Amino acid sequence: MSRQSTAEKKIDKFDPIYHNRLVNMVVNRILKHGKKSLAYRIFYQSLKKIQQKTEKNPLIILRQAIKKLTPKLIVKSRRVGGSTFQVPIELKEKEAKILAIRWLLESSRKRSGRNMHFKLSYEIIDAAREKGNAIRKKEETHKMAESNKAFAHYR
């Protein structure tokens, strides 16, 4: 019998303006060197830019972008009998969403442009329209999982 109690699941917090968990997740991934106020400023400016560009609710566009970026499968390396196989694994909903946010921010950082909020806003708009580098990353991951479907029994 275990002496330790089970860990309680942490509940994601809401952001101060939109009271949305997804916004808080994105801001926490933008965060660098503990500068959360700067991360909030970058994200809110990018939402304002999305509002001006599309004339729609930026939260709906953000949700669409994350939904279209969320992968179903991912490949992980498994070492079996001296050789390494790329094994396709299904993701849980939260893990997939975190991965989608990471791909979105990674591709927006690589994008050429002036400021981070410009690059982030254009990457979110592209992801909602199913274009851009983040969508390409998702498609590559799905192709790899599809091509390595034969190794799925190594899970």
Image (cartoon, helix red, strand yellow):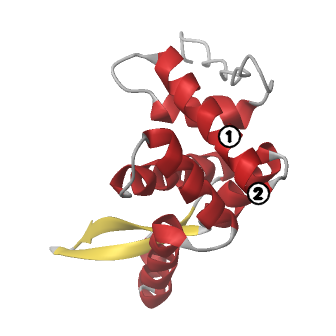
Q: Nearer the viewer, mark 1 or mark 2?
A: 2
Q: Quadrant of the N terminus?
A: top right
Q: Is residue 5 left or right of residue 54?
A: left
Question: Would residue 62 be seen by someone viewing this image from the given angle?
Answer: no
| Distance from Cα at disc 1 to Cα at disc 2 | 10 Å
Question: Would residue 93 be seen by someone viewing this image from the given angle?
Answer: yes
Say which amino acid is labelled 2. Answer: Thr
Q: Is residue 20 left or right of residue 4?
A: right
Q: Of the numbered discs in the image, which one, if any, rests on residue 54? A: 2
Disc 1 + disc 2, Cβ < 8 Å: no
Q: What residue do we see at 68% from left, 34% from top?
A: 23
Q: Which residue is mark 1?
A: 47
Instruction: List x then y, in percent, for residue 6.
Output: 62, 19
Q: Of the numbered discs in the image, which one, if any, rests on residue 93? A: none
Q: Identify the element where label 1 is drawn.
A: helix
Nearer to us in this view, 154 or 66: 66
